[in-house]
Each structure stands twice: as structure tokens, then as C-alpha cells.
Image (cartoon, grey):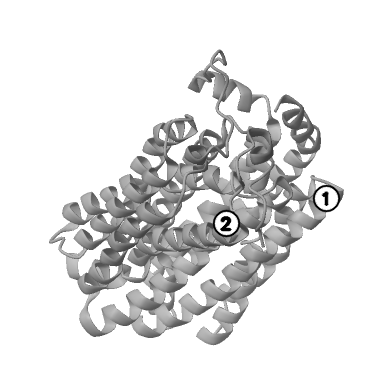
Amino acid sequence: MATQEAADIPAKTGAEPLSPAYVQYALWMLLLIYTLNFLDRQIVNILAEPIKNDLKLSDTQLGLMTGLAFALVYTVLGIPIARYADTFGANRVKVISIALAVWSGFTALCGVAGNFWQLLLARIGVGIGEAGCTPPAHSLIVDHVAPEKRASALALYSMGVPLGSLAGLIIGGVIAEHWGWRTAFLAVGLPGVALAIITWLTLKEPRRLGLIAPPASDAPKVSFGDALKALGAKRAYWMATFAAAMISFLGYGQAAFLGSFFARVHEMPIGQIGISLGLMIGIAGTLGTFLGGQIADRAAKKDTRAYMTVPAVAMVAGAPFFVWGMFADSALLCLLLLAIPTFLNSLWYGPVYAAVQGLAGHKLRATAVAIMLFVVNMIGLGLGPLILGFISDTMADTMGPAEGLRWAILATSGVGLIAVVLFLIGRLTIRQELEATAREA
């Protein structure tokens, strides 16, 4: 796990490095923030069935609400926020604090929505806030740790995905079963406002402490066009980006409807679904995310192509267990089988994000992440739930809602093969491109 040096930049400026204890605190605080980020984003998935029944929605509307509407504002706003975060005068801690307060407040407002359009607008508000989290957070993390520890540090941050999903599923399911889905939104949204204040007061911006060397006064500014041109020359960056988008298409699409799948196919109550899915996704996903960073850091010391190899092999290994799980007769066997691909498909976070940071260089850290997240979330978050929901509605006409959903999930799972191919293509050039970026620094 990442600790110690704030990269190698403090030695260049002569400033006193951040203490290992503070670096640990900062990394764990950012993990907590990202956990809330995903909790607030994903809680709607476990609440999908009661929301659908209460507001009389279709699966397509659920997919639009949980996916495309959120993704549009999340991805589009992420780029200008990242561009701002990449400017030396920007305070990334303040950006993250304000973003946290905004998305938490809109999550709470979801609980008072009276119809589909009000809930849709509240989810859009959540997307506006969350757009200001990950790009500046990644940039901040890289300024806290040495290059050889980046995959582990970014994997630690990425553990917020399974941990947030775990908390959202369990908290949302239990509260919804006893007090209703509206109370669940209020319960998870309001604490984020308090955490935003703590973040504002306790986290430090390394740039303001003299730990990061300012750009030379005559150094040309990197325009967005120049950023695209620089990144466009790095094939491995785009292969990793689109591979991650394919994995996210699977992840977001299935996450939006797995609760409904267990309710319809296995006839489980919502509280039991929340606890079961929360533990499965939380434990398997957290272990996979953490180990992915550890494996990549160690393997990349010998060969940086491991950033592409590790997630590709993991995707192939998990596919048979996923198909088997979808046809399992019992809910318990289904959960146990799905835990295996959940674990394996979570290995990509550390390797891919470390590769992106290495390929981007220090001038484009937040921008590179924002562009990546634009692609990943427009395809994954924007289209995954929407397309899966549309296929489910279409198949339900002849198969019924339970079988229609099962086959919709299976039909969309084939995009995993595309991710594997893209990772292998990226593997061909990533070593040379990382070396070229290092020489340019």
C-alpha cells in the first residue's frame, strides 16, 4: 500500500516533504470520499424495484435515470473541471470539497422526488457534483506518492467503487425495507455534507506548500487541443481507455439490474438482496481492486506491459463463472459464482489508472483522467444500464420480466471480449510509450 515520499518533486523544490502519517491520512480520506461518491451513485440500483413500483417506471426509464442522464453531465463537466485542476493555481482540495457537498445534497433531494422527472433532475445534480471528484483526486494522489507506488495508491482509491457499492446496497436495502426508499436517499446523502467540511479543513494542497515546482514563467500553456494531440499519439492510452469503457459497460449495466434480477428470478426480498449483493460485491470487488494494484506494481518493475496483461487475463478467466452463475438454480450458488468474475474484473483499476498517469505526464494528469472518464462513463455508465434495460423490456414481451432480464444481462456480457482484445493491442506499445513520456518530463 502506498505511503512515504510525495513522488520525487519535493527534492526539486527543496520543500519539506509531507510526513508518511499525513500521506496515509490523505489517501484514506480520499478513499472515504470516493466511497461516498459511489455509495451515492449506486444506491439507486438497490432501490430500483421500489422506485419502479412507486413511480410506475419502465426498465428503460430506470436505465435512463441511473445511466445516461447521470453520465452526460458527469462526463461533460469532468473535462473543464480537470482542466482547471491541472492549472498550477488551482486548489484541488477545495474542488473536491465543493463537489462532495454538491453531490451529497442532491442525493438527499432524490428522497423527496414526486415523479420521474424530479428524480431525473436530482440524479443529474448528483452527476454535476461527482464530476469534480476523481480527476483532481487522481492528480492529488500522484503528487503524494512515488512513481513505483502509483498503481497501489490509485488502487487504494479505487477501492471506493466496491466499498461504496457494498455500503449502498446494504444500507439502501435495509433502510428501504423498513422505512422506504425515500429515507434511504436522505440517510446516505446528508453525511457527505459534513465530510466536505472536514475535507476542506484538513487536507492540504501540495502546490500551496511549495512541494510542487511551479511551471516556468515562459512555459507555454497546454491547450485542450494540444492535450488531445499529445494523448492521441499514445495508442496504449486509448486502448486502455476503451477497454475500461467495455468493462464499465458490463459493470454499470449489470449493477443497475442485479438487484432486480435477484428479486424477479430468485424472488428475494429487498433487504436480503441488499445485504447479499453488498457483501458479494464489496468483499470480492475490494480484494480484486487492492490485489490488482499490488500485482501490477510488482509485475511492472520487470515489464510495464503488465498494466495491460493483468486485466486481460483476468477478464478471460472470469467469463465462464459468470455464465454459470446466471443459470444457477439457487440464489446462494448464483452469488458465489458471480463473486469470482466480480473479483477478477476488479483487477483493472490500479494497472489501468497507473498506466494512464504514466502515459499522461505531470502536465496532463487530471485532463488525461477526465478524458478517459468521459469515454468510460459515456459508454459504460451512459449506455450500459440504458441498453440493458431496453433489451430487458423488449425480451419481456415474449419471455416475461424475469427471463427477459436474465437474457438481457447475458446478451450484453459479450462486450467483455472486446475489452480483452483492446488490452492486448495496448500491450504492444505501452512500454515504449511510457519510456518516451518519462524522457519528456
Q: Position of residue 439 (x, y in %)?
A: 77, 27
Residue nearest the viewer, comparing 208 with 193: 208
Q: Residue 8 location, x and y as percent? A: 69, 41
Whether residue 330 is visible here, answered yes or no, is: no
Front residue of this view, candidates 177 and 131: 131
Name the residue type under label 2: Val
Task: Measure the alpha-carbon separation of dots 2 and 1.
Answer: 23 Å
Is residue 264 shown above or below 108? Answer: below
Query: What residue is shown at x 28% (from left), y 64% (from top)?
Result: 189
Q: Nearer the viewer, residue 134 or 221?
A: 221
Residue lying furthest right: 302
Q: Position of residue 364 (x, y in %)?
A: 57, 31
Check if mark 2's residue and mark 1's residue have beta carbons within 8 Å.
no
> Which amino acid does the dot numbered 1 rest on?
Lys
Which residue is pictured at 56% across the width and 73% down the height?
326
- Is residue 355 rendered to the left or right of residue 92? right
